[in-house]
Image (cartoon, rainbow, N blue to C red):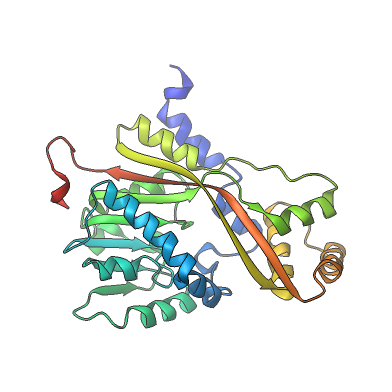
Amino acid sequence: MNDFFNEAIWEQAWKDHGDTIVNKMNKAGIAPAKAFDRKAKTFNEQSFNEEGRKRTTRIINWLEGQGVRFENVSVLDIGAASGVFSVPFAERGARVTAVESSLPLIELLGENTAKFTENKVEIVPEPFEDIDVQAKGWNQAFDLVFVSMCPVIYNWESVENIISCARNFCYISMPADSTEHSLFNEIWTLITGLTFKKKPTEMGYLLHLLYLKGYSYESLITRETKTMEISREAALQEVMNWLRSQGLPADERNLKMVADYLERTYPSGKVVVRQSGRFGKVLIRLKDQNMHTREDL
């Protein structure tokens, strides 16, 4: 059999892929479930500022364009963070179950959803990976399962666990290749003397396995760019974590080299960072679309 069409080989290849998002976090000494603890407040501000709301609206508009409806439906938002999507889902009439494991983000999520009454948003404060879907009664329990840029996906088994919760639709988004990060690019050259080269991510495994396993789905790859300003201290911490994730030593020598570079290059103490990259989203249809109209959800 041609290996290109062999599901088992692709599933194993994903498991063996060393550059998964989860593996990079582990190399950096960051527990995926707690990855946003330190920057929860900043992430929340960026999620609900004008640019963040526009980005959220674009994604929701894309979903609605594919036939997803939110009025009187149930949504499982996995990796809900501070409610960047849970809030607008509830505002559009959905009943939302928001799963989040970061304590600072859970606190912000509670604040952002406090305005909703009648249990419009239920917060589940634990990692999705630790939840027994069957015991929880979540098997095919939600009209839409929504997973946006969350490291809960790390192999095909994790995808199947997520899909099992959905009745009608399952949405997954993740990076399509490594992000172009202006500061990281500068530091990579400083440390190695080489130009940083982007690598494809596990999005390719996801799409190909969905195809091989016979799922119906819509997919879209876009290029996104954003600019943000962070303190020199925060930049130093992020760079050192990133070096670990790339398999480079985060030792005293490199710490001093990076700190000296940041002080010389950004004397104001503020570091302007430009991030861009390709991001993929996929909407999996779990009902035969020839038998059901868009008004079903």
Q: Is residue 103 left or right of residue 138?
A: right
Of the pair 276 and 124, the residue shown nearer to us: 276
Choose between 65 and 131: the one closer to the eye.
65
> In this rendering, is residue 46 above or below 4?
below
Q: Position of residue 59 (x, y in %)?
A: 38, 55
Residue appearing at x 43%, y 81% in the figure: 107
Query: 9 or 58, which lies in front?
Result: 58
Relative placement, left or right, of 18 versus 116 is: right
Query: Which image quarter: residue 145?
Result: bottom left
- Viewer-proximal residue, 20 or 40? 40
Which image quadrant is residue 122 in? bottom left
Residue 173 in view = yes
Q: Residue at x 22, y 60 (%)?
A: 70
Residue at the (56%, 65%) spot, across then down: 31
| Image quadrant in which the N terminus is located | top left
Give the x, y percent position of residue 294. 17, 46
| Residue 243 shows in this picture | no
Name above or below for residue 235 compared with residue 103: above
Residue 3 location (% of width, % of height): 48, 22
Q: Position of residue 76 (x, y in %)?
A: 29, 61
Q: Quadrant of residue 213?
A: top left
Residue located at (70% from left, 52% from top): 246
Q: Is residue 216 left or right of residue 176?
A: left
Q: Looking at the image, how many numbered discs can be counted on the residues?
A: 0
